[in-house]
Amino acid sequence: MNGLLTARGLERRFRSGDVGWLDVLRGVDLELERGVVVAVAGASGSGKSTLLHLLGALDRPTAGEIVLDGVSYGSLGSDALAELRARRLGFVFQYHHLLREFSALENVMMPLRIGGSDAATARARAAETLAAVGLGDRMSHRPAALSGGEQQRCAVARALVHEPALVLADEPTGNLDQGNAVVVADVLFRLARERQAAVVLVTHNRQLAQRADRILLLEDGRLRPVAGVEALP
């Protein structure tokens, strides 16, 4: 196994005015390998986004540990976690969150510039990645001049341009029609596997989940594997 990430005993509880404490995650274990796509399914409110926030170092667990390439998140302070997010993680959301005043090329350059790359290097790598997602002739366009599918492909390029170890995708095709959803999924899966990034994909889309290497169901605060989408509730 080409191990990348290990999560053990993840718990996350939130204070609730009605019930005192709400246990969202109750002991989640997860192993990820490079180049593997894992789909996480579950009912609304089951904690899928909470899990992504923990894996993405956007929140800290109430209990448990996450280790990425031998580095425990719990050993890192706020500045080191921010650097880890900038250099080692990529994020794709349901809505692209592109900056509308910048071109597609400039949007994709940003993770590299934040990570310390010079402008020429960032520009070249961003152009190469945009070409890889089929937007080589749309690089100078601002988001408003791109279709919904093109905007999301641009977001995928931005998430993968700095070659992160782990990509976290929260309903990345949820705002697209079926045709564009297939195209965006093709781009995400191909680039991630080519660049040996692990992907954790939260989705309600059964066709998308079926294309993952593994399908996990988050239920009652815990993850369990399922044999296929036909086993999902």
Image (tube, helix red, strand yellow):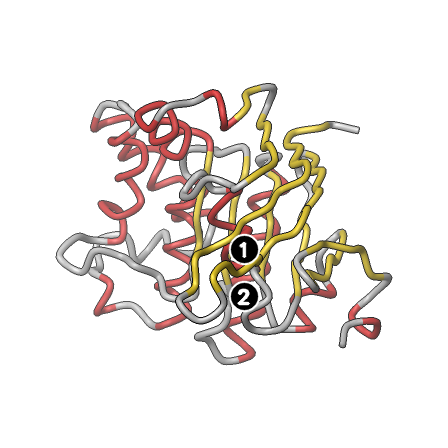
Q: Quadrant of residue 80?
A: top left
Secondary-structure class at tag 1: helix
Position of residue 108 measured from the top left corner of the image (x, y, whole percent): 31, 45
Quarter of the image where the C terminus is located? bottom right
Q: Quadrant of residue 116?
A: top left
Q: Which residue is mark 2?
A: 183
Position of residue 216 measured from the top left corner of the image (x, y, whole percent): 73, 57
229 on left or right of 15: right
- Name the residue at the right extreme: 227
Whether 88 is drawn above or below 187: the answer is: above
Position of residue 190 measured from the top left corner of the image (x, y, whole percent): 61, 49
- Name the residue at the bottom extreme: 177
Quarter of the image where the N terminus is located? top right
Residue at the image point whose x is 49% and y is 72% from the top: 174
Q: Residues within 10 Å of mark 1 (few under 14, many from 20)?
A: some
Task: Determine contact: label 2, label 1, CB under 8 Å.
Answer: yes
